[in-house]
Amino acid sequence: MTVAVNGEKIFLGTNGYPLQSAAVYGPIHSRRYGYSLGINPLPISYKFCDFDCVYCQYGWTPRPGSEVQRTEERLKSANELLSEVERIFQELTAAQTPVDMITIAGNGEPTLHPDFLKFVKGLVRLRGEYFPGKRIGILSDASQCHRPQIREALQGLEERCMKLDAGDPKTIEQINRPAGGFNLKRTIEALKSLDNVTIQSMFVQGTCDNTQAEQVDRWVNAVGEIQPISVQIYTIDRPPADSRIRPVPMARLHEVAEICERVAGVPTEVFE
């Protein structure tokens, strides 16, 4: 499904939320990062992800045999993406657009791009040329961080915000619905060995719920094992893939944050 915005065709997720329409988008003003320039190495016409989270703002993930189908758009090579990124970086610097942070995210899980390491190395080079001194970060579901090339790419960035919505496989399956091959224990081990990781966790209620006492205890244990530099927790504020998912009251999020700080010993912040 598409809509026209200022004469440009924008693709929508299955819940009607617009997908990112280019390799570079924004800057978007963020309370965490200031003016954050988004980088999308993925297709613009469909979500490309190995998770199918019930809360995803882009709706359900297209998978073989599902009702949600991909378009014929292919993944761009690293060279194609970097050419597009450089062109937009040139335009932004010429316009003196304020940029405080460059964030790799986009329409799904960016580390699934087959040329991800090459792309990151090129992006770091372009950052030095057009936005020297600005930090590059990533928002990732952490599913690929055990792979050597992905680890090398992640270590080349300044900010690593990695998803962990639960500390047990059953809740992960209910909330994130990962594609085959995901291993929570392996992911936790990989996160433990990455430098300066920030854990981001989404808490939800409704059809699925990861806020019950036992679930929170298992999640806190996993955070304690990983020992990230910080934890950021939040709940939904955009239309989720599953319309029956509900946001968690702020009071409960603050309770979870207090437990995490006290038991895991990690600074934990609630984003409202």
Image (tube, rainbow, N blue to C red):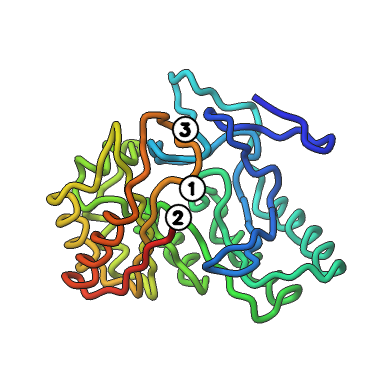
Task: Judge left or right: residue 210 versus residue 30.
Answer: left
Among the two numbered marks 3 and 2 on one chain, the one whose residue lies closer to the N terminus = 3
Rendered residue at 21%/54% (across/down): 185
Q: Nearer the viewer, residue 2 or 30?
A: 30
Going from N to C along the chain, the mark reached first, 1 or 3, is 3
> Would residue 147 be visible to someone looking at this image?
no
Q: Residues within 10 Å of mark 2 (few under 14, many from 20)?
A: many
Which residue was labeled with disc 2? 140
Q: Secondary structure at mark 3?
A: loop
**Numbered label attached to residue 144:** none
Label drawn at residue 109: 1
Which residue is rendered at x = 61% and y = 59% of the image?
Answer: 119
256 horizontally vs 99: left or right: left
Q: CA distance from mark 2 to mark 1?
A: 6 Å
Disc 3 designates what residue?
61
Work out whether residue 159 or residue 87 is closer to the camera in this orientation and state it: 159
What's the residue type where badge 1 is placed?
Glu
Identify the residue at horizontal 80%, vertical 36% (top origin). Answer: 8
Q: CA distance from mark 3 to mark 2?
A: 15 Å
